[in-house]
Amino acid sequence: MSDKRTRPSTNPPSEPPARDLGLLSLGPYKVSPGARKEKLRQRSWKPPASHERPRPWTELRAASAFSFLDGSSLPEDLIEEAARQGLEAMALVDRHGVYGAPRFYKAAREAGIRALVGAEVVLAEERARAGSSRAARRSLSPPDPPRLTLLVESQTGYRNLCRLLTEAAQGRPKGEPAASWEMVERHAAGLHCATGGEEGPVARALSAGGLAAAGETLERIASLFPGRTHVELQRHHQRAEEHRNRALVDLARRRRLPLLATNGARYARRQDKELHDVMTAIRHHTTLDAAGRLLAAQRERHVKGEREMSALFADLPEAVAHAGELSRRLDFTLADLGYRFPDYPLPPGETPISFLRKVAWNGARSRFRPLTARAQAQMEKELAVIEKLDLAGYFLIVWDVVEYCRREKILVQGRGSAANSAVCYALSITAVDPVKMELLFERFLSEER
């Protein structure tokens, strides 16, 4: 019987498919776990064709396998499908973390897609309420607590999101982070809030207390995110979901809040639902046969394109249009994350790399005895990489700290993979001659990393 979780492959039977999550081997040779993980990340990207006009819809609520047991696709799978669907951007919104954002960003950059950042944040008060309800006490698997969907607009927003996630995890059992409304308020700047689908606090309030309770919750969210609150709608061909959508549209229009169409993607392709079902059963400590309504009724939470979403929301085109508009307001990606080192005070007429070359070569003449052709070639190679990666200022700052310690007779010693660098040895940051010991510089620094 074939494994439904793997996609059909054109490889010969003796070769495993690239997405196979089992043991990976190349012919008769077994591959290390690290190489297996790297193989899973490889994709043959097919970037979307260019468009003359901005696309009206963007998926702003996709979760990856980094949403532990709640998403079933790797970040690379989501991006691959987004590229196939012709999406210009996508937001990765994993549960209580941005762990998948670096891999998501790297894959998106290679595919020509903007990788937006966000997270789903569990609410503490609702977590306690969900676990103490009468239905939860009767059930072996109490409902998951509601979550706010937060999207990053700026560097301030990314900083606030990371602080909120950290604060929500402090002092709580592992795997059970939760944020209070007060925490959310303190860290709301630079973030947009989507009210969520069935797991959102507005939908939960609607189910438990009707329109009045849902309206109060929505007003609370809108007060925390003024001008940055979107009422989220999803359509997965379920009757109860459509009743909820009608109520949400009414609540949004009364308060003049924009509607937002998302698909709440939890896997990349339609056929990936089987794996998502397995993860859902594991999350609820049950079996597939006994899971019942814990499993999604339809195969609809995959990455969809503009045409399919526009057809789903033909009666609410503004919800589709607002997704595209919001994606263009979200100006932050991990490309904006780079740390800027302090400027090293340079002598007149010097640049960071020219001054680093000068002090490094001066140090090399006294440190390498003799300064062989091999050592000189290694120095040139490392300095070229340092210049290309624009890290000369960083090396000068570390060198300056080391020189100060030596002058003040403070014990100082470079450690770790820096010992593999001839430049670090020449600057007296490290004490081991990496050329003589035949150490690999790329373990310390490389263009690929």
Image (spheres, grey):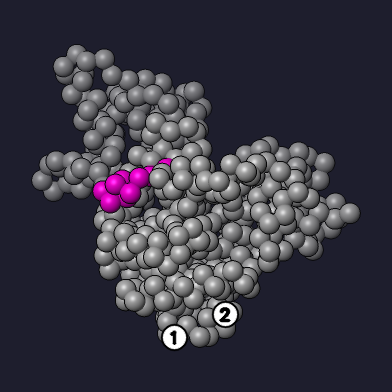
| Vertical arrangement, residue 270 with respect to residue 40, above or below | below
Q: Are marks 1 and 2 in contact (CB under 8 Å)?
A: no
Measuring from the top left, give residue 128's x and y in whole percent. Answer: 46, 42
Q: Does the magenta stretch include residue 78?
A: no
Amino acid type shown at disc 2:
Leu
- Residue at image position (63%, 44%) is 139
Amino acid type shown at disc 1:
Glu
In this view, the mark in front (1 or 2): 2
How packed mark 2 is, by other alpha carbons closer than 10 Å (few <14, some 14-19, many 20 or more), is some
- Residue at image position (41%, 38%) is 169
Residue 9, quarter of the rendered image? bottom right
**Is residue 175 shown to the viewer in this render?**
yes
Q: Does the magenta stretch include residue 184?
A: yes
Q: Mark 1 points at which residue?
A: 52
What is the secondary structure assignment of the residue under circle 2? helix
Which portion, as a residue range, is magenta? 178-186
**Residue that sits furthest to the right in the current view:** 1
* Residue nearest the observer in this picture, 101 or 227: 227
Q: Which numbered marker is on residue 224?
A: none
Measuring from the top left, give residue 388's x and y in whole percent. Answer: 36, 50
Residue 254, quarter of the rendered image? bottom left
Measuring from the top left, give residue 181's x and y in whole percent. Answer: 33, 49
Q: Name the residue under label 2.
A: 312
How packed mark 1 is, by other alpha carbons closer than 10 Å (few <14, some 14-19, many 20 or more), is few
Task: Give the quadrant of the N terminus.
Answer: bottom right
Classify residue 410 as left or right of residue 100.
Answer: left
| Vertical arrangement, residue 23 with respect to residue 403, above or below | below
